Image: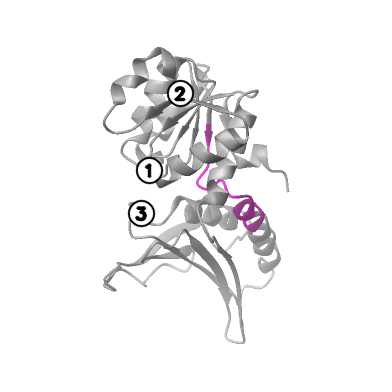
Amino acid sequence: MKIALIGYGKMGHMIERIARQRGHDIVSIIDIDNRDDFDSDAFRSADVAIEFTTPTAAYDNYVRAFAQGVKVVSGSTGWQKEHLDDVKRLIAEGNTLFWASNFSVGVAIFAAVSRYLARIMNAFPQYDATMVETHHVHKLDAPSGTAITLAEGICANLDRKATWAMGTLTAPDGSVSGTTDVPADRLRIDAIRRGEVPGIHSITYDSPADCITITHDAHSREGFALGAVLAAEYTLTHQGLLSTDDLFSF
């Protein structure tokens, strides 16, 4: 398969290595300094582009890739608030986007466990649900896209939580902003930014009697990179708006 990379930071380099190990060709690499290459024959020759950039750049990258007839796999988060309807329109026009907040197989399993636990906890209203996510200091959005996806899965299965709400954000210097005063019918998500943490997500059900916590702790970004390449392999033969629910079945 011919793959284009959009974004060539740490994740882009890791995806390149894994894709080559799996026998794929990297035909184009686009980063901040060569965006004119979207219009190149090399980029147009790609079967799929894998995009890991920033919340502000992601949507424009989709538009430019689709204009060249190239399918996109994207792990960029934070763009949905402004551009979700625009992306749905582009998909309706025949384009293909595989988007996930997290491509890790472990996170997909963790999400399935979380949804199942929420269904169990529906019968035990004495337990209040909250979430904490921790990421590296370079992450621009809070809460993380993975946290939001997990929260949406919980709220869909836990009647007492209508939606999620941002709680506190602990900055790298230890300063805390935000609020602990979140309405009872909102799933509170607290975010922490420190060091080079790849990603930790903990979901807690707390009662006066005891506390239940489940956690996914990523050791490195390699699992995310492998999942993105697996998603590209899947996207090669599928159409539309795709997700890890299509790739992984639990």
Note whether 13 is above or below 104 in the view shown: above
Q: Residue furthest right?
A: 250
Residue at image point 66% right, 73% down: 124
Amino acid type at image mark 3: Lys
Q: Answer whether residue 124 is visible to the viewer in this image.
A: yes
Note whether 204 is above or below 6 in the view shown: below
Q: Which residue is mark 1?
A: 9
Q: Which residue is mark 3?
A: 139
Residue 184 percent across, percent down from the top left? 47, 69
How far is the residue under mark 2 from the one under mark 1? 29 Å
Closer to the N terminus: mark 3 or mark 2? 2
In front here: 106 or 207?
106
Question: How packed is label 1: few (under 14 Cα within 10 Å), some, or many (20 or more)?
Answer: few
Closer to the N terminus: mark 2 or mark 1? 1
Q: Which residues are magenta?
A: 98-111
The secondary element bearing badge 3 is classed as: loop
Residue at image point 63% right, 60% down: 114
Q: Nearer the viewer, mark 1 or mark 3?
A: 1
How far is the residue under mark 1 from the one under mark 3? 13 Å
Taking the image as shown, residue 166 lies to the left or right of residue 174, namely right
In front here: 127 or 64?
64
